[in-house]
Amino acid sequence: MLLLIDAGLTVLWQEPVSAYLAQQQQDKLSNELDRATKDFNSRELVPLRGLGKGHVNLAPAARRWKAEVRDGQAFGRISIPKLHRSYVVVQGTGEADLRKGPGHYPKTSFPGMGGTVAIAGHRTTYLAPFRTINKLKAGDQIVLDMPYGKLTYSVEKTQIVPPTALWITHRVPGAERLVLSACHPLYSASKRIVVFARLTSTSAS
């Protein structure tokens, strides 16, 4: 009976046991991020102006944060208003990292540095943070709150790609890009669903 209940919840919502474990990790990461943000801001890293209306230059602070964060540690916080979801992002995309929440690909840019910022997440287990990213449409917002600033991205498109499509994390010309990726379809790892978004505004913490 318990196995049937677990299976039913997984189909309708998410796997409950892994969700519970991931929530414990999210709570720890949230506390870690709050402490790190307070410490980071105490150093008075002031973003430089001059990038145009609605933007501040977060690159110097982003580079400092990148030098401090290690795999498995809190990276920042992602919010997707359209889906009513918000999670602490962990640095790293290894199996242990993604059990804590969405994970930032270490080889991609940090928010505010330009280039491509790539984040992966589960769709059915460990809180299933990206379960419904297929519902995102062009123009929907995705917000990254980092210890050094807030960055807002606007969704451009969603695409289904094979697992070998490493090009999704490559740097592209133009404005900074955010990429969210997850397995597709639900309950399968045969493909990946990828959301592409462009940076539209930045502000200081």
Image (cartoon, rainbow, N blue to C red):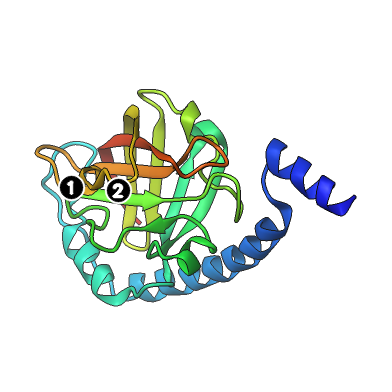
Q: Residue at x 24, y 74 (%)?
A: 67
Q: Nearer the viewer, mark 1 or mark 2?
A: 1
Image quarter of residue 76: bottom left
First in residue order: circle 1 vs circle 2:
1
Hey, what amino acid is under mark 2? Ser
Tell me: residue 111, above or below residue 7: below
Mark 2 lies on residue: 203
Q: Is residue 59 left or right of residue 1?
A: left
Q: Residue at x 61, y 66 (%)?
A: 27
Q: Counting other residues with Cα less than 10 Å from the Cα at mark 1, is it few (<14), some (14-19), or many (20 or more)?
A: some
Q: CA distance from mark 1 to mark 2?
A: 25 Å
Q: Which disc, if any, is residue 142?
A: none
Hey, what amino acid is under mark 1? His
Image quarter of residue 66: bottom left
Element at label 2: strand
Q: Is residue 162 left or right of residue 176?
A: right
What is the x, y in percent for residue 23? 64, 61
Q: Which disc, if any, is residue 170?
A: 1
Quick one: which residue is furthest to the front in this view?
A: 190
What is the x, y in percent for residue 197? 30, 35
What is the x, y in percent for residue 35? 47, 74
Q: Residue at x 48, y 60 (%)?
A: 98
Element at label 1: loop
Q: Is residue 87 left or right of residue 199?
A: right
What is the x, y in percent for residue 30? 54, 65
Q: Residue at x 13, y 41 (%)?
A: 172
Tell me: residue 173, above or below residue 140: below
Tell me: residue 94, above or below residue 13: below
Quarter the C terminus occupies: bottom left
